[in-house]
Image (cartoon, rainbow, N blue to C red):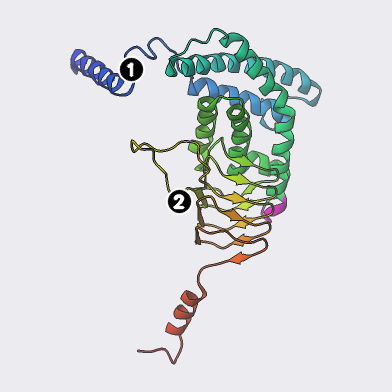
Amino acid sequence: MAHFDIGAIVRDLHDARQQWRQAHRPAGEVRGIEFPSRDALAEIVAQLKGVLFPMRLGPPGLRRESEDIHVAHALDSALHALLRQVQIELHYSAALQQRTDSDTASRALEITQAFGAALPEVRMQVDSDVLAAYQGDPAARSVDEVLLCYPGVLAMIHYRLAHRLYELGLPLLARIISELAHAATGIDIHPGAKIGTGFFIDHGTGVVIGETAVIGQRVRLYQAVTLGAKRFPTNADGSLQKGLPRHPILEDDVVIYAGATVLGRITIGKGAVIGGNVWLTHDVPPGARVAQAASREEVFESFGSSDAPS
């Protein structure tokens, strides 16, 4: 029978944990504090998808006449489970800030109630995203196909839920929910980004949308588009400054094609079209068309012509 030196490994892991805690947190700062659970949040989001779209993302075999009964049961279960995760994050935040929070239970309940009350609006926002995907993709045969199959729509359901939690002061829960979609789709949307209705990500793999990005209505992105930061200002001690607006603003009806990189707090005007593989760090006026340099195309053409230099 194989033998493993379990005792030595356990001791070394203990030492590694202690080194991390001593280096990154004051002694005892978060001792005994529970952390939010990715598994619990994955189950909560699965239930909420069935609440938002019971006949498509709910349990198999659900009948229309039982729809409201299922929604009521699943919603009650999901909100009670979410309440526990909200309490955990509030306790965790208080410990990190070394403060006593005696009102956690009532605050957690208020936050969870506000989140639940926002779900009808979330449903309408996702409806607009689904419709934008259906109308914007000639390969889409139905809105049901879009809802069930498109990674961009899955990412947006997670984003719409996560953004509500982010606005309610729960950045850790929000980030976990966004990262669950990131892992499943390759689409990385920070829950702090502000995204208008009718948003469509076609194909989606490799899309990155930063925390302070602001996106208007009816915007369309293709795969591998980055809405990122151009630079990261630092404090006097060399640490990164947090929360500064550093990502692009996209006004209504903007289209950005595959592989484009848009960096910094710049504004892409209403109706502008950004071509594939463009690297963009300056404002673009409304209605403009930005593509790769024409001179590069001319060089390629000249190499193939009969009078090209040898």
State whether the magenta stretch is mostly helix, strand or loop. loop
- Which amino acid type is marked by label 1? Pro
Could you say whether the residue bearing mark 1 is in a helix, strand or loop? loop
Q: Is residue 22 left or right of residue 269?
A: left
Rounded to the nearest angstrom, the CA distance separating label 2 from label 1 is: 33 Å
Q: Is residue 181 above or below residue 268?
A: above
Q: Residue at x 46, y 75 (%)?
A: 296
Q: Earlier in the sequence, mark 2 or mark 1?
A: 1
Q: Is residue 137 magenta?
A: yes
- Which amino acid type is marked by label 2? Lys
Q: Quadrant of residue 270?
A: bottom right
Residue 61: x percent and y percent?
A: 70, 25
Judging by the rendered image, the residue that carries numbered circle 2 is 230
Q: Is residue 217 magenta?
A: no
Residue 290: x percent and y percent?
A: 58, 65
Judging by the rendered image, the residue that carries numbered circle 1 is 26
Residue 293: x percent and y percent?
A: 50, 71
Q: Residues within 10 Å of mark 1 (few under 14, many from 20)?
A: few
Residue 259: x percent and y percent?
A: 50, 57
Q: Quadrant of residue 114?
A: top right
Q: Is residue 140 visible?
A: yes
Q: Is residue 117 left or right of residue 9?
A: right
Q: Outermost residue toward the front?
A: 236
Q: Outermost residue toward the bottom?
A: 307
Q: Is residue 202 visible?
A: no
Q: Residue at x 55, y 67 (%)?
A: 291
Question: Which residues fall within the magenta stretch?
Answer: 135-139
Q: Residue at x 36, y 36 (%)?
A: 239
Q: Is residue 232 above or below residue 34?
A: below
* Closest to the observer, 31 or 232: 232
